[in-house]
Image (cartoon, helix red, strand yellow):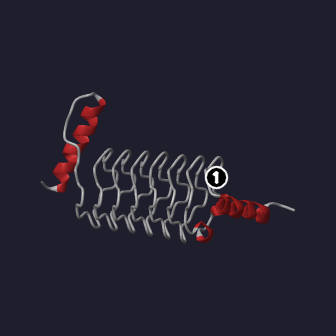
Amino acid sequence: MPLDQILARHAGWVRERRSHDSGDAAHLIKSDLHDASLPGAELASAALGMADLYGADLQGASLARAFLGFANLTGANLAGADLRDAHLWKADLTGADLRGANLHGANPAGAIFRHANLQGADLSRAALHEADFAGADLTNANLRGANLLRVRNLTTARGVGSADFTDAEMDEATRDYLAGLRRETSPS
């Protein structure tokens, strides 16, 4: 079935689901959506595990509760996307644009955020354990109550000092690193 028909049927399913009817959810597991143009797409609760979304334009898309485990989102545009409660286990978001995206309560455990732009993103209550933040930009990101146990390469991320880590769960090394940043940036 062509992608535009799958998306139309899925949008209908989302509308029907809100009224407690049944419909056709999008099952795009292992799909090749490389460089797909899907800005503002309705993909809430869609199954996109192991999909190739390399370079895809998903700006402002609704991906709340979507399954994106092991998906390739390298270089994808997810700016302003709704990823609340999405499952992003071990997804590759290298170089992805997530500026202003909402990942509240999402589960990107073990995800790769290398060089991703997370400026102003809401990662509150997200399960980020074992995620890799090498070179990521966390300027003004909200990580309140997030699980940051065993995160990797946070020390190489940019904008960490302006991010909100209030009530985040983290290991001692991460806590010490953040405390050191606060001491460096606080006025004497």
Of residues 169 and 156, the one nearer the viewer is 169
Q: What residue type is labelled 1?
A: Phe
Residue under pointer 1: 165
Residue 27 percent across, percent down from the top left: 22, 50
Question: Looking at the rendering, which quadrant does residue 160 occupy?
Answer: bottom right
For image coordinates 58% across by 52% down, the residue present is 143
Which residue is pictured at 48% across the width and 65% down the height? 113
Frontmost residue, 174 versus 78? 174
Q: How crowded is mark 1: few (under 14 residues within 10 Å), some or many (20 or more)?
A: many
Q: Measuring 22% from the left and 39% from the top, which residue is drawn there?
A: 12
Task: Kindly state the secondary structure of the residue where label 1 is placed.
Answer: loop
In the shown orientation, is residue 74 left or right of residue 174? left
On the image, the x and y values in percent for residue 170 come to 62, 55
Seen as rendered, the residue at the extreme left is 1
Q: In this view, does 71 lie to the left or right of 79?
A: left
**Which residue is found at the position 60% from the left and 61% from the top?**
139
Split into 4 quadrants, where in the image is the C terminus?
A: bottom right
Image quadrant where one finds the N terminus: bottom left
Looking at the picture, how far across and down is residue 149, in whole percent?
57, 56
All told, the count of numbered labels is: 1
Which of the 4 image quadrants contains residue 140?
bottom right
Outermost right residue: 188
Q: Where is residue 20 in the image (x, y as percent from the top left)?
A: 27, 28
